[in-house]
Amino acid sequence: MNLLDFQAIRAEKLGQSLAFFVSNTPKERLNWRPKPESESKARSILDMSTECVLVNRYMAALLKGENPERPPAGEQSEFVIDDPEVLCQELVSSSKELADAISQLKEEDLDRDYPHWRGPLKGITLIEMPCRNMEYHGGQINYIQTLYGDTEFRVPKTWR
């Protein structure tokens, strides 16, 4: 197995893990936000998971040589996938799309510059960014679950 195969598998499993965390959250808690301090902006599980879908698709498009518009992620986005079943399907399919794009790369593509709304980024950075994003938000989802009292530790099948 080479680096690209590993990263493709990792990306796909991370999306499946996020879908698992979303599916193990009560529906009424998916749009719940911790009470923010003063002007801070807490985000819901739906907000963060939708961002992961958009970022996965954006990065996959860049890796395939397309020039997509910047995804409306984070605080700039009012778009939210609010149906948990659809959200889980989109997490799985967008991470598969990302994995497929990574799998099509050649080793020399890791050192190539790709256009990005923040400026040119190397391929090695692009294949890692969406994975870091999913890991980061997976941790936030788990933390939100503990804030509303869910302390059961669930392990996705993708972790075995």
Image (cartoon, helix red, strand yellow):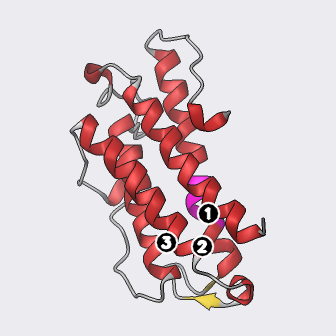
Query: What is the distance, in whole Å, between disc 3 and disc 1 at their CAs?
Result: 12 Å
Locate residue 19 relative to residue 106 in the image: left or right.
left
Element carrying mark 2: helix
Mark 2: which amino acid?
Ser
The front one of 15 and 35 is 15
Magenta region: which residues? Answer: 128-133
* Disc 2 + disc 1, Cβ < 8 Å: yes
Mark 3: which amino acid?
Met
Where's residue 155, x and y in %? 60, 25
List the residue tagged with mark 2: 103
The residue located at (24%, 53%) in the rendering is 78
Q: What number is the disc on residue 59? A: 3
Mark 1 surroundings within 10 Å by alpha-carbon count, few (fewer than 14), some (14 through 19), many (20 or more): many
Where's residue 46, x and y in %? 33, 39
Q: What number is the disc on residue 8? A: 1
Q: Main secondary structure of the magenta part?
A: helix
Q: State which quarter of the image contains the N terminus.
A: bottom right
Q: Is residue 37 shown above or below 14?
A: above
The reply to whether the magenta stretch includes residue 129 is yes
Q: Is residue 7 shown above or below 87?
A: below
The residue located at (68%, 33%) in the rendering is 160
Element carrying mark 3: helix
Mark 1: which amino acid?
Ala
The residue located at (53%, 39%) in the rendering is 17
The front one of 134 and 5 is 5
Query: What is the distance, in whole Å, between disc 2 and disc 1 at their CAs?
Result: 6 Å
Where's residue 55, x and y in %? 44, 63
Q: Residue 34's image quarter?
A: top left
Mark 2 surroundings within 10 Å by alpha-carbon count, few (fewer than 14), some (14 through 19), many (20 or more): some
Visible residue check, residue 134: no
